[in-house]
Amino acid sequence: AQTVTQSQPEMSVQEAETVTLSCTYDTSESDYYLFWYKQPPSRQMILVIRQEAYKQQNATENRFSVNFQKAAKSFSLKISDSQLGDAAMYFCAYRGTGTASKLTFGTGTRLQVTL
Amino acid sequence: DAGVTQSPTHLIKTRGQQVTLRCSPISGHKSVSWYQQVLGQGPQFIFQYYEKEERGRGNFPDRFSARQFPNYSSELNVNALLLGDSALYLCASSWGQLAGSGNTIYFGEGSWLTVV
């Protein structure tokens, strides 16, 4: 079974600074997808960024980028130029290429953004 | 276009009762999945339905059941409620069944269930 581990329950960053959230995962599959979701107080899960395991190039979406290390099974999220609106719970998630549309989530990292 | 919509937003039930949660996927999406998110944890996969058939089930007891209707909306039913069933129930939709570059999963805002 796949597992996703987020070892940082809480992180804090000053506005305009950069922060990195860590995620490791365990799987025996060779092809899969990795995601970072943001969950603000409204509780809706919002997709931040995705990475296909077969792609060596790290994904980027504006101020968000990932460091995908397939051999190490590591998938960290870097947020640059942090904004107050980035404050939320961030979940790392794994999805295999099997028959079920199942996401396996980590326990989350609460990000605080301070002035 | 409307996103994934869920109802009710909040509800309180008594132990032993039954509850039905409803979900309408994004227009054009044929796959609906349900997740349970207990406070302080990440969401846990319960079910996936695609084209009205169950395509995946997580590690949940038989008290949990679901179905998908011809218009692709879905209901999640939980019988004999326990205190531990108190959680946020998230519905997610995607256009296809399998993982793929274009098959992004979108979530609704969830239904808060409190069991007392």
Image (cartoon, rainbow, N blue to C red):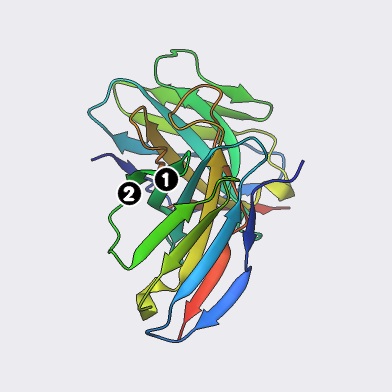
**Do circles 2 and 1 both sit on a common chain?**
yes
Q: Secondary structure at mark 1?
A: strand
Drawn side of residue B7 relative to residue A94, left or right: right
- Camera-side residue: B15 or B49? B49
Asked whether residue A99 is in view, the answer is yes
Crowding near pointer 2: few (<14 within 10 Å), some, many (20+)?
Answer: some
Residue found at x 42% / y 82%: B17
Decide: is B104 above or below B100. Answer: below
Give residue B43's position: percent from left, percent from top. 44, 54
Crowding near pointer 1: few (<14 within 10 Å), some, many (20+)?
Answer: many
- The answer to whether mark 2 and mark 1 are in CB contact below 8 A is yes
Q: What residue is pinned by disc 2?
A: B57
**Image quarter of residue A56:** top left
- Real-space CA distance between mark 2 and mark 1, rounded to the nearest whole angstrom: 7 Å
Give residue B102's position: percent from left, percent from top. 56, 23
Decide: is B51 above or below A109. Answer: above
Amino acid found under the numbered disc labelled 2: Arg
Decide: is B46 above or below A53. Answer: below
